[in-house]
Amino acid sequence: MEDLTGTPIAPASDEQQLVQIALRGQLDAFNELILRYQTQAYNLAYHLLQDEEAAADATQEAFISAYRALPGFRGGSFRAWLLRIVANACYDELRRRKRRPTVSWDDFGDMDEEANPHLADGGEQPEAALQRSELRDFLEQCMESLPPDQKMALLLVDVMGFAYEEAAETMHTQLGTVKSRLARARARMRDLLQTQAELLPARYRLKDSLMLEEQS
Amino acid sequence: MSRERWSDQELSAYLDGHLDQAAQVALEADLARDPVLRRQVAELRQTVTLLRALPLREPPRNFLLTPAMVAPPRPQRRPLLLPFMRLTTALAGLAFILTVGLQLLPNAGAMPAAAPILESTQAMEAPAAMVAQEEAPEEAIQMRSFAETGEPATGARIAQADTPVPAPATAEDSAAIATTPEPEPQLEGGGIGGGGGEPFLPPGVSGGDENAALTPSPEPKPSLVTPLPYPTPTCSANQKGLAPTPTPMANQTAYLLPPTASPQPSTGTGLVHEEREPLARRELLPGWLAPILGSLTLTLGLATWWLARHK
């Protein structure tokens, strides 16, 4: 069983069992949980920090903090609890940057995303890979303009496939707040996609796809 | 217009199936008859579809934990330790500087280079001299009786020989005194002979006047260390700066000396009475204090530097 992003969803009982084993000091059990959620944790950190190295450091620190705070885990969604710790680590880093800014935020928009070797997918056709890369660049560029709270709601629900309740638990807020933030983020993204449609690959443009949909 | 009834939040919730049943029926009815609203919902759905197609980034590395990573953090050093160490170092350094400064002052420096050598001797002599002074009234009475009877001639000689004991002198000092003309030569004969018809008087006492022995003289009598026919080993020991061996007889003779001269060490200048004030200062600041404070300051400074470096 997989979620929308292809990440295998662990049965709750299995997850709770791993947590209990990790609580007895078995680090391997906790590392099993890390392997399941490290991609989501890293992507959340990357979208909040807009920097690969900082995102990796924040993710690592968050996992260490999570292991030490594991006795305080009161059940529920372990993924939500873990990503909340990641988000808190990112907010701490953002606050630290605000106190001591070293790099302009504008610099992050010029980063060469194609240099990431992890994006290479051996089984994907070059044209499809290029379109996916262009789509990701465009969406990420649009998401950068969102406030952090809206961006996080969009990431959790639409990109990572979290349920509203799980997203609310991760963001440590009310369900209605998640709905509101998500709706504003989606509307903002929709407007950006319409105004900057020429930057998107043709197959992803809203008007073209809607015309095709209406014709069919 | 039906599309104005629906907010983006309601349309968003509708796409996720989070709109309540009544609102969902009303919205679907509006969608059936309003193409603009239908297009609005289609654009929002397409946006969500694109976002769900957004590929996640692969992490640059695994974030697996190792036992070293999750080891309990080292206990934090108490934050006040470093300031405390700095303060202690500063105080020790200040005490060291003050001690060295006091020892180098001109008054304290009136003592020549031999002063440090003599300090140990003074430390040992001072208590004996003080005891001697305290015992002086009793022994003065006893010696007065001796003087009347003229019995303890031997004790008088020993006392004469031991007279310089509480007042050690340098070689030059002793030599100067030794060459001083004997003002009362009759004492020597009295001391040696011990008879001659007149009662025995202790050496240093002017002839026949026993009150002179009990009355402090403002200046030490050079005759106290006048060379005698018999050897005076105690005096030579003092010339070498060695501590004399206190003897009961030495204590007995202390009262015979002027109060300013008996416990005072000689400075080599011959003016013994000038040494009282520097002696008090040196007793307050013993010679070993400066090296101890210096070592303490150095040790504390190194420890503070190490703490600041490894903070």
Image: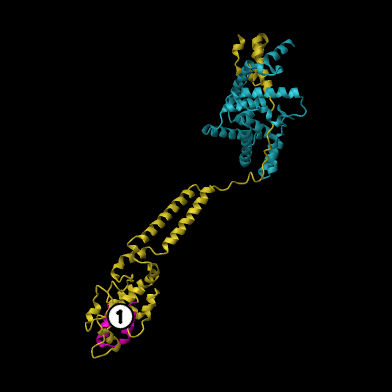
Chain colours: A cyan, B yellow
Q: Is residue A74 found left or right of B96 in the rendered image? A: right
Q: Is residue B176 above or below residue A171?
A: below
Q: Quadrant of residue A189?
A: top right
Which picture quadrant has residue B104?
bottom left
Describe residue B109's horizontal placement relative to residue A49 as left or right.
left
Q: Is residue B238 above or below residue A132?
A: below
Q: Chain of mark 1?
A: B
Q: Answer left or right for A99 relative to B95.
A: right
Nearest the viewer among A211 and A124 is A124
Characterize the local packing of mark 1: few (<14), some (14-19) or many (20 or more) Cα atoms within 10 angstroms.
many
Q: Main secondary structure of the magenta part?
A: helix
Inspect this view and state whether residue B55 appears: yes
Specify start and end residues of the magenta stretch as a single range: B137-164
Relative to residue B232, is residue B4 drawn left or right?
Answer: right
Label 1: element kind: loop
Indicate the amino acid at tag 1.
Thr
> Residue B306: percent from the left, percent from the top?
52, 51
From the top left corner, tell me how far across and down residue B195 is, in percent.
27, 90
Residue A198, position as x, y percentages in the image: 66, 16
Q: Is residue A98 above or below residue B1?
A: below
The reply to whether the magenta stretch includes residue B152 is yes
- In the picture, the quarter occupied by the C terminus of chain A is top right
Check residue A173 for magenta coloring: no
Picture quadrant of residue A1: top right
The residue shown at (60%, 19%) is A188
| Residue on which disc 1 sits | B226
